[in-house]
Amino acid sequence: MEKTQIKDFPFVAVPVVLVATEENGRMNFAPHAQYGAVAAEPPIVYISVIKEHLTAQNILKTKTFSINIPDKTLLEKLIYCGNTSGLEQDKSKAFKTFYSKIRVPLIEECKINYVCELVRTVEINCCYMFLGEIKETYIANSCLSGETPDIAGIDPLLASIGGKFWTINELKYTRER
Ligand SMILES: Cc1cc2nc3c(=O)[nH]c(=O)nc-3n(C[C@H](O)[C@H](O)[C@H](O)COP(=O)(O)O)c2cc1C
């Protein structure tokens, strides 16, 4: 296989999530692609957020955030939230929301929502890497396959270099345990 060296970039295509925060009674939403799982038991995720963003400032203050998985029907709103900082414009009405038990805002239109409590903050260059423990998970009943999420129903969006968005929809294999 012949190879070409290209620009260094940390991913090919990854799920993009909407991070919701609230400070002083005002909700804020921003898309994040630098997101991932750190551990399963207890469930810990990370997001890397540029220090100046309102999302980062809110998480430092409240020590909570939520991860909401959008599908393609939310693309327009996602792009709006990614092009605009809550420091400049009030994005609090961009989505319908509900609250978790520990009172973190969650996006109603997203089929799966994770409520996270901050457990550690790592400073890395221009970002804070926030590690959050998942405390509550909500899923649309229509996306439940037994007790697990139905990925085709959730239809997550993937982001890739060059500002492109993709969908995945084909199950290839189920590993027997
Ligand atoms: C697909 C996509 C992925 C993004 N991923 C990140 C990310 O991982 N970390 C980050 O700090 N900003 C990321 N951004 C940029 C923020 O969403 C954007 O700067 C937003 O306006 C910040 O809003 P806030 O100041 O209200 O938090 C991403 C934007 C898009 C469109």
Image: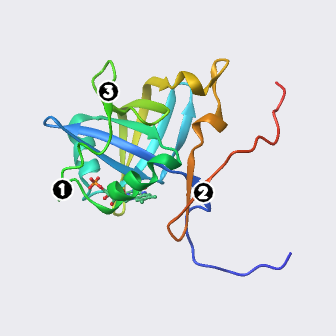
Task: State the separation of the CA atoms marked 2 and 1.
Answer: 29 Å
Residue at (44, 38) in percent of width and height: 68
| Residue at the spot of label 3 | 98
Mark 3: which amino acid? Phe
Helix, strand or loop for disc 3 = strand
Which numbered dot is residue 25?
Answer: none
Q: Quadrant of residue 151?
A: top right
Q: Is residue 50 left or right of residue 110?
A: left
- Ligand 1 location (quadrant): bottom left
Q: Earlier in the sequence, mark 3 or mark 2?
A: 3
Q: Earlier in the sequence, mark 2 or mark 1?
A: 1
Mark 2 surroundings: few (<14), some (14-19) or many (≥20) residues within 10 A? some
Task: State the separation of the CA atoms marked 3 and 1.
Answer: 22 Å
- Quadrant where the N terminus sits is bottom right
Q: Nearer the viewer, residue 10 or 69?
A: 69
For label 1, being within 8 Å of ligand 1 is answered yes
Badge 2 vs badge 1, beta-carbon distance below 8 Å: no
Image x and y of residue 92, in percent: 23, 43
Mark 3 surroundings: few (<14), some (14-19) or many (≥20) residues within 10 A? few
Q: Is residue 99 above or below residue 38?
A: above
| Residue at the spot of label 2 | 166
Helix, strand or loop for disc 1 = loop
